[in-house]
């Protein structure tokens, strides 16, 4: 093992160099923390006990590995946490899109390329640079690819604080950014944790369409539109369908009203720019896609992971929330016969709602 691993002055310089390399690779900031997550683990386990994770069984299937980095990757001493801004220009008129029931609202993070591959590649490049600097360096890089409490680690690494809506907030950049982590055996100096600046603000709690933020820092995912449109594999509970409006993939409401997002910066990463076929598309046009067209239009995009059936399910709900018109009713009736049982159930709900509208 390279003796530099035990050389504190060298490690301090290396930590600064790592942050500079991260910026050169397109990350907007990087920080370093240790592996202690005792308080965060307690909060996470309590969340699981309440059943707030819904059908996301993967959240508990790894036991405490999610909150104990050394259990996941033995030998881990530090976590390098990095963030990358993703806010596309489409964010500038997001609220207007939400007010137009004929247009599909897609969470702004999902308008461009799937961030998993892009960030994982950059983390690998960062790790290669560190590996070239000294021998004995061991690492594993993650981007939603393993049981990791990424927001808790990023908060400890000084990248921001976890807000009342459970998203990470940065004082200079708001919340529109992705996170990635490198678990390493290097005993690097750690950064100071971020300080919470939410104060008495409750904007995110008040605006949530389905009241999923049941209290400050308490999210019942089973009520969250992001969960309902992305994670939920079965029928969407009827009690939430009207509140979903035209949101067909994810929800940004709690971020749109957050005062700290006035400091958010538009992305400079070409891969995160909105794709033309997903930028405020017409709901009826999306509903007309065949499965092959769905796969073609979502190639390399995060939306593809929910599959065609759930995509059709979500759009059927959104069409049911439109202003009634013959074109929408005809489209729903036409598509019903060839749809799966689950999609048919949502089409029937939409038709009933449209026909009973005053």
Image: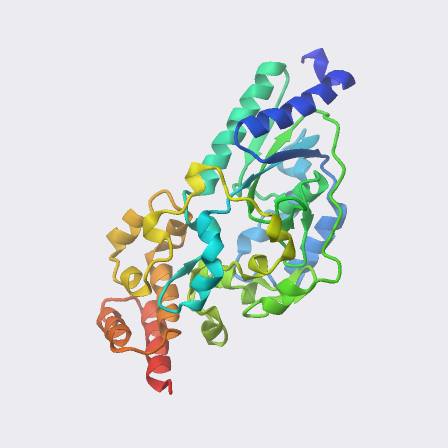
Q: Is residue 43 left or right of residue 337?
A: right
- Residue placed at 40% from the left, 74% from the top? 321
5 left or right of 112? right
Q: Is residue 152 above or below residue 334?
A: above
Position in image of residue 197 (x %, y %)? 73, 52
The residue nearer to you, when weighing 199 against 351, is: 199
Q: Give left or right: position of 316 versus 212.
A: left
**Quadrant placement of the C terminus:** bottom left
Q: Residue at x 65, y 44 (%)?
A: 172
Residue 279 screen position, x and y as percent: 37, 53
Q: Nearer the viewer, residue 217 or 339?
A: 217
Q: Position of residue 325 (x, y in %)?
A: 29, 77
Q: Along the horizontal axis of the image, is 228 left or right of 41?
A: left
> In this rendering, is residue 149 above or below 221?
above
In the displayed structure, 51 sits above or below 117; it is: below
Please name the residue shown 64% across and 17% down the image: 136
Q: Residue at x 25, y 71 (%)?
A: 331
> Is there any visible trace of residue 149 in the rendered image?
no
Which color scheme did the rendering employ for the protein? rainbow
Against 18, residue 153 (above or below) is below
* Frontmost residue, 320 versus 149: 320
Place of residue 49 in the rendered image (x, y in percent of width and height, measured from the top left): 66, 61
């Amino acid at each position: 093992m390279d003796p530099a691993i035990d050389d504190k002055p060298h490690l301090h310089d290396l930590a600064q160099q790592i942050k500079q390399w991260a910026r050169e690779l397109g990350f907007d900031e990087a920080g370093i923390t240790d592996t202690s997550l005792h308080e965060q683990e307690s909060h996470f386990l309590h969340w699981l006990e309440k059943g707030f994770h819904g059908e996301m069984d993967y959240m508990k299937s790894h036991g405490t590995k999610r909150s104990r980095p050394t259990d996941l990757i033995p030998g881990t001493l530090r976590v390098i946490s990095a963030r990358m801004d993703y806010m596309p220009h489409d964010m500038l008129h997001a609220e207007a899109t939400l007010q137009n029931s004929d247009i599909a609202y897609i969470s702004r993070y999902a308008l461009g390329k799937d961030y998993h591959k892009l960030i994982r590649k950059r983390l690998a490049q960062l790790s290669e640079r560190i590996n070239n600097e000294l021998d004995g360096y061991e690492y594993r890089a993650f981007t939603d690819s393993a049981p990791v409490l990424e927001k808790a680690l990023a908060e400890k690494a000084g990248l921001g604080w976890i807000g009342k809506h459970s998203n990470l907030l940065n004082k200079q950049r708001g919340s529109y950014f992705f996170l990635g982590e490198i678990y390493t055996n290097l005993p690097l100096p750690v950064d100071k944790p971020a300080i919470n600046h939410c104060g008495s603000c409750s904007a995110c709690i008040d605006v949530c369409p389905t009241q999923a933020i049941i209290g400050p820092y308490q999210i019942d995912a089973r009520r969250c539109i992001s969960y309902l449109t992305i994670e939920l594999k079965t029928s969407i509970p009827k009690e939430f369908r009207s509140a979903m409006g035209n949101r067909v993939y994810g929800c940004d409401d709690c971020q749109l009203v957050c005062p700290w997002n006035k400091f958010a910066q538009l992305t400079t990463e070409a891969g995160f720019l909105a794709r033309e076929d997903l930028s405020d598309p017409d709901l009826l046009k999306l509903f007309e896609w065949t499965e092959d067209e769905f796969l073609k239009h979502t190639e390399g995009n995060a939306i593809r992971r929910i599959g065609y059936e759930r995509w059709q399910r979500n759009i059927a709900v959104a069409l049911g929330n439109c202003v009634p018109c013959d074109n929408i009713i005809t489209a729903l009736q036409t598509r019903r016969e060839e749809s799966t049982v689950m999609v048919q159930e949502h089409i029937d709900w939409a038709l009933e709602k449209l026909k009973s509208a005053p």
